[in-house]
Image (tube, grey):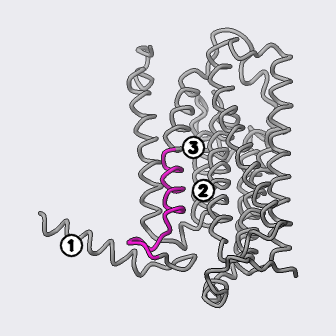
């Protein structure tokens, strides 16, 4: 293992020892990646095997497949945010900050869709 | 009312002060470094940018003219690209873990792997755009094509910026300018990279997989 010594070393390495010790998360990261791979494979399966009964709740619409895909998307999104982006391990203020941006984005989506009357059949602009 | 707000703020502040942290507390009111807080603020604002672009795409996804999404999308190819980008998040987080252990060799390996996976994703996107263009889907062909290229193009630009940052970190590490106490720099770049990944998770499902 090669290490690099910094000429402007202002923080002693010993100070960081605690952080290093409380950070044995490599196994968790690999398991998370495996989980994400399985979820992605399930997503792709909705395209590869569209006739599979699990994502067909309605004979007349795609509501089943859309719901399954949205749920899988949300699972992947929050898994990456919580584990890989460390929201699970970090200060709650960061989670609130991220949710604020996410909430505003959802409000923008709803506002535009309502403005164009997407949710009102026959009135779509 | 004012008292209850003050009590709530005190409770939240106390929760933040005693929250488990991934890293050592900084000497700021929140215990979070300004750089990291700024990156999270930037990412929150990026949610709005991509929220707007995804909304526009959903509004215009049914083309009035030109090829339809169903006719041109190559889902198996894009699935492989998506998987590549997803795995780059793993290599990125392993790079952060490596520098916090002080393992500079592993840091370089994982940074290089992340940049390579990102470059593979971008190559796939360039290939995909070229194929679509040859099949008659130009930027101004239809409202669908404009919304599609703008959304995926913006995302591709973000991935490219991420690759530049990763290569910069790699060069800094090779020159010995990335000591352990600067591990937060790698973490902040990692946050940006993971965000690019979560945005693609949304795009992949909403644009490619969900049927019209």
Q: Residue at x 67, y 42 (%)?
A: B158
Q: Nearer the viewer, residue B188 or B44?
A: B188
**Quick check: A38 above or below A114?**
below
Residue corresponding to mark 3: A67
Camera-nearest label, 3 or 2: 2
Measuring from the top left, give residue B46's x and y in whole percent.
53, 44
* Nearest the eye: B26 or B152: B26
Q: Helix or strand or loop: what does disc 3 sit on?
A: helix
Mark 3 crowdedness (10 Å alpha carbons): few <14, some 14-19, many ≥20: some
List the residue tagged with mark 1: B7
Q: Position of residue B138 (x, y in %)?
A: 75, 15
Q: Quadrant of the N terminus of chain A?
A: bottom right
- Element on which disc 2 rests: helix
In the image, is residue B35 part of the stretch drawn in magenta?
yes
Chain ID of residue with mark 2: A
Depth check, front residue: B26 or A28: B26
Q: Is residue B103 visible?
A: yes
On the same chain: label 1 and label 2?
A: no
Residue contact between numbered discs 1 and 2, judged by CB atoms under 8 Å: no
Residue depicted at 78% across the width and 28% down the height? B73
Mark in front: 1 vs 3: 1
Q: Find the distance from the CA under tag 1 to the CA under tag 2.
A: 34 Å
Please state the extent of the stretch shown in magenta in the rendering.
B27-45
Q: Quick one: A59 or B2, which is closer to the camera?
A: B2
Judge left or right: residue A116 versus residue B63.
Answer: left
Residue underneath mark 2: A75
Which SS does the magenta portion mostly show?
Answer: helix
Query: What is the secondary structure assignment of the residue under circle 1?
Result: helix
Q: Residue at x 65, y 91 (%)?
A: A14
Going 62% across and 45% down the picture, which residue do you hit? B199
For disc 2, the neighbor class at 10 Å (few under 14, some 14 to 19, many from 20) is some
């Amino acid at each position: 293992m090669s290490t690099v010594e910094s000429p402007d070393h202002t923080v002693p390495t010993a100070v960081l020892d605690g952080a290093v010790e409380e950070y044995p998360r490599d196994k968790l990261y690999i398991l998370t990646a495996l989980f994400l791979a399985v979820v992605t494979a399930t997503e792709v399966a909705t395209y590869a095997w569209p006739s599979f009964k699990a994502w067909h709740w309605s004979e007349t619409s795609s509501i089943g497949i859309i719901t399954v895909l949205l749920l899988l998307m949300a699972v992947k999104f929050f898994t990456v945010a919580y584990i890989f982006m460390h929201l699970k391990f970090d200060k709650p203020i960061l989670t609130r900050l991220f949710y604020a941006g996410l909430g505003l984005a959802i409000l923008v989506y709803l506002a535009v869709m309502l403005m164009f009357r997407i949710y009102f059949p026959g009135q779509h602009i | 009312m004012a008292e209850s707000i003050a009590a709530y703020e005190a409770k939240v502040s106390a929760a933040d002060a005693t929250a488990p942290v991934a890293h050592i507390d900084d000497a700021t009111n929140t215990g979070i470094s300004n750089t990291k807080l700024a990156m999270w603020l930037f990412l929150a604002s990026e949610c709005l940018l991509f929220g707007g672009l995804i909304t526009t795409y959903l509004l215009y996804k049914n083309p009035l003219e030109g090829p339809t999404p169903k006719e041109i999308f190559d889902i198996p190819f894009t699935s492989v690209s998506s998987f590549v980008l997803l795995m780059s998040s793993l290599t990125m987080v392993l790079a952060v873990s490596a520098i916090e252990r002080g393992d500079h060799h592993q840091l370089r390996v994982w940074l290089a792997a992340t940049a390579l996976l990102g470059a593979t994703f971008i190559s796939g996107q360039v290939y995909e755009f070229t194929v679509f263009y040859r099949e008659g889907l130009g930027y101004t062909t239809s409202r669908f094509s404009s919304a599609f290229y703008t959304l995926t193009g913006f995302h591709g630009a973000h991935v490219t910026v991420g690759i530049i940052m990763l290569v910069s970190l790699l060069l800094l590490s090779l020159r010995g300018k990335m000591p352990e106490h600067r591990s937060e720099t790698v973490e902040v770049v990692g946050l940006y990279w993971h965000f690019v990944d979560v945005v693609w998770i949304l795009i992949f499902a909403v644009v490619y997989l969900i049927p019209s």
